[in-house]
Amino acid sequence: MRLLFGIILGALLTVGAAYVYDSAHAPATTTAAASARPLVNWDVVSTKWNGLAVRARSEWTRIAG
């Protein structure tokens, strides 16, 4: 149980740290800042997360129904 909790906590801390880093280093419109790209493409993460949520809901409905 502690192992599972540690894995989940580690994943959340990693994603949270990447989000905080990307939020603090948001690229400006200048060419020097354009080279400082974010670590994570959050649009892709959002799309994949929404797809995962839809699939989980449909699978739960299939199993429970």
Image (tube, grey):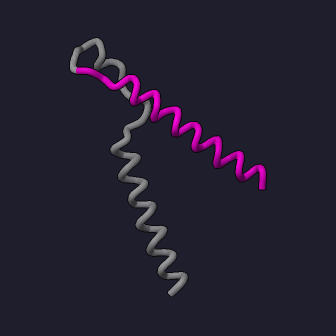
Residue 17 x %, y % = 52, 32
Q: Is residue 51 left or right of residue 7?
A: left
Vertical side of 3 occupied by 33: above or below: above
Residue 18 x %, y % = 49, 33
| Residue 16 shown in magenta | yes
Vertical side of 14 occupied by 63: above or below: below
Q: Quadrant of the N terminus?
A: bottom right
What residue sits 21% from the left and 20% below the top?
29
What residue sits 71% from the left and 51% below the top?
5
Most distant residue in the left direction: 29
What residue sits 30% from the left and 16% below the top?
33
Magenta-highlighted residues: 1-28
Quarter of the image holding residue 55? bottom left
How many numbered marks does the figure carry? 0
Q: Is residue 9 left or right of residue 47?
A: right
What residue sits 39% from the left and 58% below the top?
50
Q: Nearer the viewer, residue 17 or 49?
A: 17
Residue 47 x %, y % = 36, 52
| Residue 41 shown in magenta | no
Most distant residue in the top direction: 32
Residue 27 x %, y % = 30, 23
Most distant residue in the bottom direction: 65
Vertical side of 38 occupied by 44: above or below: below
Our reading of the magenta stretch's main secondary structure is helix
